[in-house]
Amino acid sequence: MPEHADLIPGTLDLLILKAVSLGPQHGYGILLRIGQISGDALNIEQGALYPALYRLERQDLLDTEWGVSDNNRRAKFYRLTPAGTKRLKEETRSWNRTASAVATALAARPQEA
Amino acid sequence: MKPLRLLLQGLLRRSNMERDMADELAAHLQHRADDLIRSGCSPAEAARRARLEFGAVEGYKESCRQARGLAFFDELRGNLRFTARSLRASPGYMLAAVLSLALGIGANLCAFVSVNSVILHPFPFSHLDRIMLLGEGSPKLGADRGPVSPANFLDWKDNNRSFEFLSAFNSWDALLNGTGEPERVTAARVSGDFFATLAMAPAQGRAFMPREFEPGADAVVLVSQAFQKSHALALGRTILLDGRAHIVVGVMPDDFDFPLATEIWAPLALSPESKARRDMADLSVLGRLKPEVSAERARAEMGALAATLAKRYPQTNEGRSVSIVALAKMDEITDGFVLIVWCAAGFVLLLACANIGNLQLARFTTRQKELGLRAALGASHLRLVRQLLTESLVMSAAGGLVGLYLGWCELVMMKTFIPAQVLRWVAGLRHLEITPLVLAFGFAISMASGLLCTVPSIYQLLRRRNTGRLGETLKEAGRGSVSSRTGNRARTILVAGEVALALVLLVGAGLMVRAFQRMLAVNAGIDPKGVLTLEMTPSPNAYRDAAQTAQFYRRVLAEMDTLSGVQASALSGSAAASKWEIEGRDTPAPGEPRPGALAISAAYFQTMRIPMMEGRPIGDRDGPDSPGAVVLSEGLAHFYWRGSSPIGQRVRLGGPSSPWLRVVGICGDVRNWFSSEAEPLAYVSYRQEPPPAVRFALRTAGDPMLSAGAARMAIRRVDADQAIYNVKSMEQALAEETSGVKSAATVMSIDAGIALLLALMGAYSVSSFFVAQRTQEIGVRVALGASPSTILRMVLGQTARISAAGLLAGLAVAIAMSAMMSRVLYRAVALEPVTFAALTAMLAAAAMLAAYVPARRATRVDPMTALRSE
């Protein structure tokens, strides 16, 4: 079992947008996909996904539609709206900037005199 | 908008959304279980583990609902349910609050209907704010809004750049024949741009054509819709006006009523001679400003124009100025009355709010336990505030609805009391209706007063939070006695405010009633009781010169004298009085009184019961061939002759060509009904100066209206083709004239009554609360030997202190208000100190009386029970 990292607050929305950007998916599928693309390294409580999905839908970043899953079961599918696509791009850029800044900062070594 | 759509879906199809959410979460669990089964779990175990991994389903559902923005509405629903329950539990409070609110809101709605119709929308014209009335002023004559001469009007029209349209009109009392009984109609002759200025057009038929403004081609008329209906006129019909046939070419829309009460409009066709006249001003001028021009700029431009004209035509235009007044602001006196009544209604509503605020504070105190409990269970303070607000708003919504009904009743009642005559002459009064704007106003004040009522309670609540005592209130309320100082102070201030407002309203109503009484006062100089008046304007076609007209009047008077039951009959009519000059003296300076002239018959003073002070009245001997005679009113004579007698002196009421009149007598002053000031008057003989229009007056023994038919017949016997109008008793005429003040006085008296009642409620509630709160203390005092009278003094003393503070504050506002009312009532109105003191004392006594009931209760406190009540 891989070691789980706790989610940094605010990143769940970004991960959902990313997962959905790869193709329309239902809630459970989104969860699986996040696990898949993050190498199962992140710890997400299953139920916590839904309030986030409802919030994103309300912000007009996601669209929903009922459909049939691979398991042949009825499920609600989420898809990115144009606004969602745009937001994902922005958020990704800003995340990368922050991450590289933090990485650079952490890579600093004491200067030798 | 998607978020809005989602919210609406969530709200309106709540069950759909819930099902959707449940389905989605179930699908998630199934998918997870499927996966677990595939990895080797038993179905039952898989379902169990899927649920376990998911977490608290209901908790996440709640989070989802919040994410949708539904939480607010869920809470609202809860609050409303709770409100309904708690209000049902205290119906007395609910009833008192809703009723006081409804009274205040009803009074305000009714007052606002008047404001809306009379001040905001007196006319239905689309550019009302830009429509101006122009007048010519002559500072020398002390007049600033006079009529305009045709030549000046035409020069203004051609040379101004401020007005989009400039038009002229004058009124015309026309004699209508050929449609049944002869009748006098209110007509107006209007210039070419008149209807364009007002942006109005006929509802049927056509407007006037340019060529119809030429003399000879002008025998066409437009009629009002009411006139068309009452006379069953078809377009193209011919009617006889002043003996000349006019064709009806169109009908104006029903809401078009300008100049006020006009029934017929005809073209103003100026002959070349009259177009050149500057010495005869008989036009009213109406203009519509260009959109970008302010009234100020127009005033500057027209002022400069008047100066140019004065230089060019010094003889006629010297010193003439131009006045520009917005049409909507013409009737300042009526506006003032309407605003005063509105103000009074506003005060009533404020009082109602203070009263409810007080009731709520009392409730708040008894509810401390409940609120404390809710706070202890984790309700945030904002949530408690929202609960209080919900209760208040539910109450004010109910109050608003009942108030709407009360206001409507008041409006219906008010409308039946407005005499038809007044309805015709006050712009907008015809349209007293509940419009969407009135409803919006009602909604706004309901909500605002609901919020206002809650302010004291919320203040209390937040204060407790800040001092960290809300949780403690649970314990406190359990002990049930410790009083909160701030609560008491708030209640005290509220009740003092109520007393102050009540005093202001009582004084206001008192002033208005006093003004009304003054207007009805018998010392008007005449005795209106038993006098019948009829008016008529003999047609100039039938009576071509002064001698014929005078002869006609003479014959009518002779007929009237033969009527049984008539003690005296006379006529009067305005006579020309363009100047005022006393032989051998300089012309009077501006500001000195200049009399109006009244042409009268011999028995006029006797009929009106105007006393003769000196000399003789105008008599039968003052005929056309005898020397001119004049009787002056006392005030006028006193002003110019001081101690000495003017009898035998000669005066002139016109220019150099008019005859000198010898003063033969001095009569008592007649006072203006509105201002109650003596009017300077010069009475001349109708046979020397026959007026074009007259009013016959008959003094009868009994009810004057019983003689109306006979009086009409008397005139008919002389000439059956003349219109007789305004047949009424003088008392009725006076009642019509004073009806506005009367209705203001009535409404304000009702307001004051409501105010008194509310203030009493306030005084009673604060005092009984005081007693309830201090039962223990009173018990201790009684146990230690305090006599009942000491206890009584203690409780009443508190009310006395509060009332005194309120009365003092009210006094200051009342004084400011009487100054404002004096302005509107034209002359200072003041209450005699005795009345003022009586009102104050009455209010104070009433407050004490209200406090007496709980105070009595306090004296009967049994010390043992009180002490054990801990």
Image: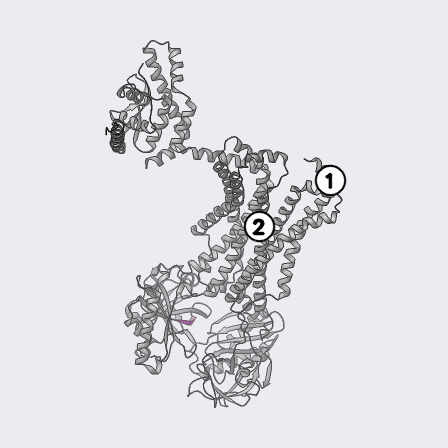
Q: Secondary structure at mark 2?
A: helix
Circles 2 and 1 on the same chain: yes
- Asked whether residue B173 is drawn in magenta, I would say yes
Q: Along the horizontal axis of the image, is A7 left or right of B329?
A: left
Kindly identify which chain the residue marked by label 2 belongs to. B
Q: Amino acid at mark 1?
A: Pro
Q: Which mark is residue B795?
A: none
Quarter holding residue B49: top left
The residue drawn where x is 48% and y is 55% is B112
Quadrant of image for the N terminus of chain B: top left
Q: Residue at x 59, y 85 (%)?
A: B614
Residue B493's tag is 2
Above or below residue A56? Residue B174 is below
Which range is magenta? B170-175
Q: Secondary structure at mark 1?
A: helix
Judging from the image, the colouring scheme is: one colour
Q: Is residue B175 above or below residue A54?
A: below
Please tell me in which quadrant of the rendered image residue B735 appears: bottom right
Q: Main secondary structure of the magenta part?
A: strand
| Chain ID of residue with mark 1 | B
Query: How much space separates mark 2 and mark 1, taking CA atoms?
Result: 30 Å
The x, y position of residue B63, in whole percent, is: 40, 28
Q: Which mark is residue B863?
A: 1
